[in-house]
Image (cartoon, rainbow, N blue to C red):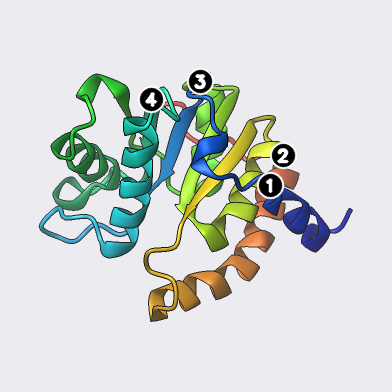
Amino acid sequence: MGAETALHHRAADVVRPEELDGTRVAVVLGAQVHADGRPSRFLRGRLETARRLHAGGRVASLLVSGDGRAASHAEPTAMRDWLVAAGVPAADVTVDPHGYDTYDTCWRAVHVYGHRQVVMVSQTYHLPRALLTCRLLGLDAVGVGDESVRGTRVWRQGALRERFALLKLARDVLTRRRPSTDR
């Protein structure tokens, strides 16, 4: 099965929230955080999607994963803070500060946090590759996508970037890259 075929096959794993039974953890992939700590519009779309899934009982908990190196605008800290301010109990949000890319996040979901079944939350165009990454790493995953920023310049840039990100995914899988195991 070629990469394009695999991606289209995995697109079938993008589900509607009402198809979820509330047993899985939602993995929210990081994105830009402004210098003042506010999530970008792109990231807020992902966070609102995750918040609705949790509030509706469609997921049991949330794993927010992103680059946590910059104290002033650490993605997962800003994500947790936004979710808690939006009413998600802090105890239901786990912070992964070493999710530097989709591969890292998926690998760490299995090998650091011990998850076997997840709901990936990102923009819809990103989900086929994210779900393929999960499958290649042994993670049973479905996706719920956000489209609140569809049609913007950032959306178009991200969709174009996805084509090149497949090359990096292939390298990561072939070399069996091992991300950080720190918490």
Mark 2 highlights which residue?
136
Quarter of the view holding residue 141:
top right
* x 45%, y 34%: residue: 26
Quarter of the view holding residue 8:
bottom right
Mark 3 highlights which residue?
23
Q: Amino acid at mark 3?
A: Thr
Mark 4 highlights which residue?
61
> Disc 4, disc 1: CB below 8 Å?
no
| Disc 4 packing (10 Å; few <14; some 14–19; many ≥20) | many
Q: Quadrant of the C terminus?
A: top left
Q: Nearer the viewer, residue 21 or 177?
A: 21
Q: Amino acid at mark 1?
A: Leu
Residue 123 position within the rendered picture, expressed as x and y whole percent measured from the top left? 47, 58
The circle drawn on residue 132 is: 1
Residue 28 position within the rendered picture, expressed as x and y whole percent measured from the top left? 41, 42
Q: CA distance from mark 3 to mark 2?
A: 22 Å
Q: Choose the circle earlier in sequence order: 4 or 2.
A: 4
Q: Is residue 170 left or right of residue 85?
A: right
Residue 165, relative to residue 180: is it above or below? below
* x 71%, y 49%: residue: 12
Say which element carries label 3. loop
Q: Choose the circle earlier in sequence order: 4 or 1.
A: 4
Q: Amino acid at mark 4?
A: Ser
Q: CA distance from mark 3 to mark 4?
A: 9 Å
Q: Choose the circle earlier in sequence order: 3 or 1.
A: 3
> Disc 3, disc 2: CB below 8 Å?
no
